[in-house]
Amino acid sequence: MLYAPPMSTHEILAVRYGTVHSTKSDLFLRYGTYREPDAPQDMDFFFYVLRRDGEVTLIDTGFAPADAPPRGRECLIAPEAALAALGIEPASVARVIVTHCHWDHIGNLALFANADLHVPERELDFWSAPLARNVQFWAHTEEHAIAQLERAGREKRVSATGADEEVVPGVRVITVGGHSPGQQIVVVDGTVILASDAAHLYEELELERPFGVVVDLREMVEAYSLIKRLGAAPGAVVVPGHDPLVAERFPTEGFAVRIA
């Protein structure tokens, strides 16, 4: 069943560019706690395009295609090629909102040399500190991606986002932590809640089953409550960051899923 399109002043597209075949026991934290049989669970990979009045904002940039095979992921379409098919030149992108600094969210920052980057302050602080090099954290990012973020910082193109603020009219970011130290969600026009990895899957959110990659379990669970509260507003919809069902619940044209 398709969702009714939410009211929004933005065109919002989820770009499905990658996928992975996995299992619930591999994805959910301590899955044995639920005393349920294991089952297949795929995850898709998305980044988002917001367009209004001819201006383009991206939410995340996807992974670099070359980084996918070593991690057992499949790149369905290179993010740069997906943007070209949508008529978007990387040089024309006004800004990139980075939800967090994991490898599949900042892998293509180098394409957007003219864009301002809006990155959670807590992410900037964490990934620039020595602790980030501990393998349990560093395994979830890529050296080249962090280097591009640092380069953008030297070029004065990085703005740190706080706990709850409006980046541009109608686009609100809220830092929730949990999955990554400064994980943030994006709320567009008050009706579209792009959860990013604060909720990878509908099941994760609805049953409050924490994901396996977590830095603060309490923050992760608290984020579920916040997302559900925001999603309960009249006309609002929640879009998890990695659920294949997104492409079934919203109108889809090839790799582009129309959220609004």
Image (cartoon, rainbow, N blue to C red):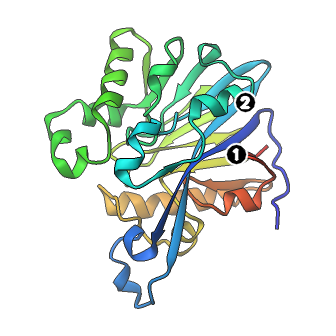
Q: CA distance from mark 1 to mark 2?
A: 10 Å
> Do labels 1 and 2 touch, CB within 8 Å?
yes
Mark number displayed over residue 85:
2
Asked if residue 163 shows in the view, the reply is no
Q: Which amino acid, by three-letter code, is at mark 1?
A: Phe
Work out which quarter of the rendered image holds the N terminus and state it. bottom right
Q: Is residue 15 left or right of residue 68?
A: right
- Secondary structure under tag 1 reads loop
Q: Nearer the viewer, residue 171 or 96?
A: 96
Work out which quarter of the rendered image holds the C terminus and state it. top right
Q: Is residue 67 left or right of residue 108?
A: left
Q: Quadrant of residue 232?
A: bottom right
Residue at x 33%, y 11% (from the top left corner): 154
Q: Quadrant of residue 36?
A: bottom left
Residue density around tag 1, few if under 14, some if 14–19, many if 20 or more, within 10 Å: some
User: How far across and down, in percent of the image, does residue 247 sit?
Assistant: 71, 56
What residue is disc 1 on? 255
Look at the picture and state if 123 lies above or below 134: above
Look at the picture and state if 103 lies above or below 94: below
Q: Could you tell which of marks 1 and 2 lies nearer the N-terminus?
A: 2
Asked if residue 147 shows in the view, the reply is yes
User: How far across and down, in percent of the image, does residue 212 sit?
Assistant: 36, 65
Residue at x 56%, y 36% (from the top left corner): 78
Q: Which amino acid, by three-letter code, is at mark 2?
A: Ala
Residue at x 52%, y 19% (from the top left corner): 112
Q: Nearer the viewer, residue 216 or 246?
A: 246
Residue density around tag 2, few if under 14, some if 14–19, many if 20 or more, within 10 Å: few
Look at the picture and state if 230 lies above or below 90: below
Q: Residue furthest top?
A: 155
Q: Quadrant of residue 130?
A: top left
User: How far across and down, in percent of the image, does residue 87 sit?
Assistant: 74, 23
